[in-house]
């Protein structure tokens, strides 16, 4: 059953399949903006946030969104401050510092408790994942 939603940016209806709640056209527009920023940074490595925003005609918030997604990284010595969402430590990219990422990973992986039933199901022959025969 399709999951119809309104795009948070343009308001048009679209079939939501996961990820940010925006339509395909808005996602493609974001990709064009990212390509413009990426090309600019290849030409002018080490440019400041304000330089990139002015020269590429992109909002600072859009650039920070790409930083949070881990698609851009702050260079050493830059005056841009990006903080870990968990502890507030200064980071270069993403949402969390390395320590918090490791802690969250450990918390998530430790929350799954195997039962005897899980062990028996895993050991059954023919149950689980396999490669598909590509010789069709």
Image (tube, helix red, strand yellow):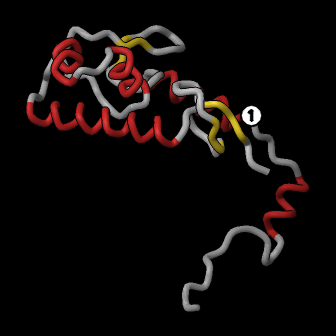
| CA neighbours of label 1 inside 10 A, class few (<14), some (14 to 19), many (20+) | few
Give the residue displayed 60% in from the left and 85% down from the top.
133
* Side (left or right) of 92 relative to 105: left
Front-most of residues 130 and 26: 26
Image location (x, y in percent) of residue 100? 51, 22
Specify the quadrant that holds the C terminus. bottom right
Please say if 18 is above or below 9. Answer: below
Give the residue displayed 43% in from the left and 21% down from the top.
97
Asked which secondary structure carries label 1, the reply is: loop
Q: Which residue is mark 1?
A: 111
Q: Which image quadrant is residue 111 in?
A: top right
Residue at the extreme bottom of the image, as rendered: 136
* Side (left or right) of 131 relative to 88: right
Q: Which image quadrant is residue 84 in?
A: top left
* Side (left or right) of 15 relative to 75: right
Front-most of residues 45 and 86: 45
Image location (x, y in percent) of residue 95? 46, 22
Image location (x, y in percent) of residue 80? 27, 11
Front-most of residues 66 and 24: 24
Front-most of residues 18 and 32: 32
Give the residue displayed 46% in from the left and 35% down from the top.
26
* Side (left or right) of 62 relative to 122: left
């Amino acid at each position: 059953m399709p999951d119809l939603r309104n795009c948070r940016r343009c308001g048009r209806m679209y079939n939501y399949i996961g990820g940010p709640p925006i339509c395909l056209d808005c996602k493609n527009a974001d990709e064009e903006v990212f390509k413009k920023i990426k090309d600019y940074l290849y030409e002018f490595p080490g440019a400041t946030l304000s330089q990139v925003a002015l020269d590429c005609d992109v909002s600072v918030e859009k650039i920070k969104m790409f930083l949070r997604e881990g698609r851009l990284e702050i260079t050493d010595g830059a005056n841009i401050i990006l903080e870990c969402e968990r502890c507030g430590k200064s980071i270069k990219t993403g949402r969390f510092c390395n320590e918090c990422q490791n802690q969250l990973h450990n918390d998530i992986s430790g929350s799954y408790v195997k039962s005897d039933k899980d062990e028996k199901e895993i050991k059954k022959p023919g149950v689980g994942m396999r490669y598909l025969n590509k010789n069709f």
